[in-house]
Image: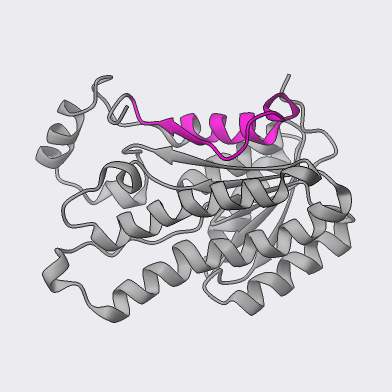
Amino acid sequence: MFDLTGKVALVTGGSRGIGRAASVALAKRGAHVVINYVSNEAAARAVAEQIQADGGKAELTQFDVGNSEAAEKSIAEVAKRLGRLDVLVCSAGISIDGLLLRLKDEDFDRILSINVKGAVACARAATKVMMRARTGRVIFLSSVVGEMGNAGQTAYAASKAALLGVAKSMARELASRSITVNAITPGFIDTDMTGALTDDQKTAINSAIPLGRTGKPEEIAAAVVYLASDEAAYITGQALRVNGGMYM
């Protein structure tokens, strides 16, 4: 079950947080994982070395998803060199928090450029390959705040909500080629983004989560593996909520 042997999976933002956990989990199921990073090559290489030490296959590819031309070129090169691209996980993303009245246009543009435009560029490049193969999996990492909103995160919530519309539209466009497109909406997960929260903030957040705790990156990675697998072949255009019951 969930066997990905022989598949090639590319994970954007694969050097840290959820992207890192997804890369490791996909490799454990047999996928040849291509780890994308922007600037921290050491962190990305550490992930690849961990995967290889465990007997898996991994390599690196450097590009900024915010640069559409570079992203599309790099993904096309990966697919050509490896002969296929079966799974794309769009995990790269940023958050610039602040109340709407203090939101700068340049910050809003940056968030949309990476979280939305970047994800779409990567998906466009990947699905060109998948369409020829008549099979593929595209998985967007959205967020619970894209569904329920959150004070101080208007721009971030907007970008993550946009990915839900992208996933549904792409799912309709690509279903005839047996390509599924889904999103995962994580709740509050223990990553770099949530690491800056104070203990009081974490306590307040946990009190709003029925399961009473923040999630682990590995729990999101498990959902990625499922949606990437043959067992999820009849699931498309969906938002899989992995949030401890925070939003139902």
Percent coordinates x, y for residue 106 in the rendering: 31, 81
Tell me which segment is drawn in magenta. 219-244
Of 106 and 6, which appears nearest the observer? 106
Say above or below: 164 vs 72.
Answer: above
Percent coordinates x, y for residue 47 in the rendering: 60, 48
Quadrant location of the N terminus in the rendered image: top right
In screen coordinates, is 125 left or right of 186? right
Of 156 and 12, which appears nearest the observer? 156
Give yes or no for residue 221 being in the magenta stretch.
yes
Residue at left 81%, top 41%? Answer: 7
Of 24 and 221, which appears nearest the observer? 221
| Residue 131 quadrant | bottom right
Quadrant location of the C terminus in the rendered image: top left
In screen coordinates, is 205 left or right of 14? left
| Residue 29 quadrant | top right
Percent coordinates x, y for residue 241 in the rendering: 42, 32
Residue at left 31%, top 72%? Answer: 108
In screen coordinates, is 140 left or right of 191? right
Say above or below: 140 vs 1.
Answer: below
Colouring mode (rainbow / by chain / secondary structure / one colour)? one colour
Residue at left 23%, top 57%? Answer: 153
Residue at left 67%, top 36%? Answer: 228
